[in-house]
Amino acid sequence: MTIYEIIILIIGGVLVGFINTLAGGGSIISLSLLMYVVGLPPGVANGTNRIAVTLQTLTASSTFKRQNILDWRKGLKLGIPSAFGSLVGAWVAVDIQEDIFEKAMAIIMIVMLGFIFYKPELWLKGKQELMDKKVSLWTMFLFFIIGIYGGFIHAGIGYLLLIGIVLGAGYDLVKANAIKVFIVLLYAPFSLAVFIYHDQISYLYGFVLAIGNIIGALIASRFAITKGANFVRWVIFFVVLITAAQVFGLIEIKELLGNK
């Protein structure tokens, strides 16, 4: 590992941790760095990213709990089916062909842009009547499906969870973000274990990336969470376009960064 790689992973990790905690989609950046800058195979990059995600969500969840905005009981009920779903998704991911994984990631990211830019405020309004209801079987099934996606690729899972938490449980943006982070913390170790079992982890890169993720999570979780959403959307927009262009062969990120 070079000094250049250490610096780029830590700086990128700070941005990823901030975006993931504030909204979601930051793993697009970390996967891009691990695949196209560091040069890890897609499957290994996918697994390695789970180390940083696990430590990042542990940091953010602890901070949210200290701020008394984390409803961990509701989060636990939503997180358990997500954890089971993540095992299914991770098992699919470790066996998928690399070119299929790359194309799937690009398509998912492009579709995700619709959730980022099409009237996001419609998805982020709290509904007290839903908050007061018990978690239904339908809601648990919904989070099982979301967990499958999280175990498969993780990138963009924050937006899916926010949509599910707001529409299914009725929380506003602040509390939904806290629950979202807690749910990821619950399922991330399970999907990480699958990648460890299949030897698709680069531990050194993973822990270096995690340093940045933890710093970013600390900053974001202490930041006024209702601010900065527009900035986050535009950052993700450009990262999605660049990464999708790389996957489809329109540009070469390594050459742009001088890492040939």
Image: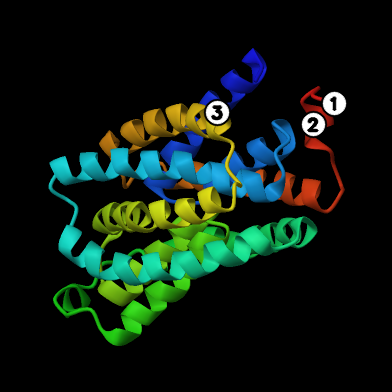
Identify the mark at residue 254; answer none if there is no mark. 2
Q: Earlier in the sequence, mark 2 or mark 3?
A: 3
Give the total of numbered labels.
3
* Mark 1: secondary structure: loop
Residue 76's quadrant in the figure?
bottom left
Q: Amino acid at mark 3?
A: Leu
* Mark 3: secondary structure: helix
Q: Amino acid at mark 1?
A: Lys
Q: Marks 1/2: CA distance?
A: 6 Å
Identify the mark at residue 204; answer none if there is no mark. 3
Q: Is residue 177 left or right of residue 67?
A: right
* Mark 2: secondary structure: helix
In the orientation shown, which residue stands out farthest toward the top?
Answer: 3
At which x and y percent is residue 50?
A: 49, 46
Q: Earlier in the sequence, mark 3 or mark 1?
A: 3
Q: CB under 8 Å between callouts 3 and 1?
A: no
Q: Earlier in the sequence, mark 1 or mark 2?
A: 2
User: In this picture, is 144 found above or below 226?
Assistant: below
Assign the N terminus to one quadrant of the image: top right
In-front residue for pair 121/202: 202
Residue underneath mark 1: 260
Q: Is residue 255 left or right of residue 48?
A: right
User: In this picture, is 203 found above or below 78?
Assistant: above
At which x and y percent is residue 71?
A: 17, 59
Q: CB under 8 Å between callouts 1 and 2?
A: yes
Q: Is residue 14 left or right of residue 96?
A: left
Q: Is residue 236 visible?
A: no
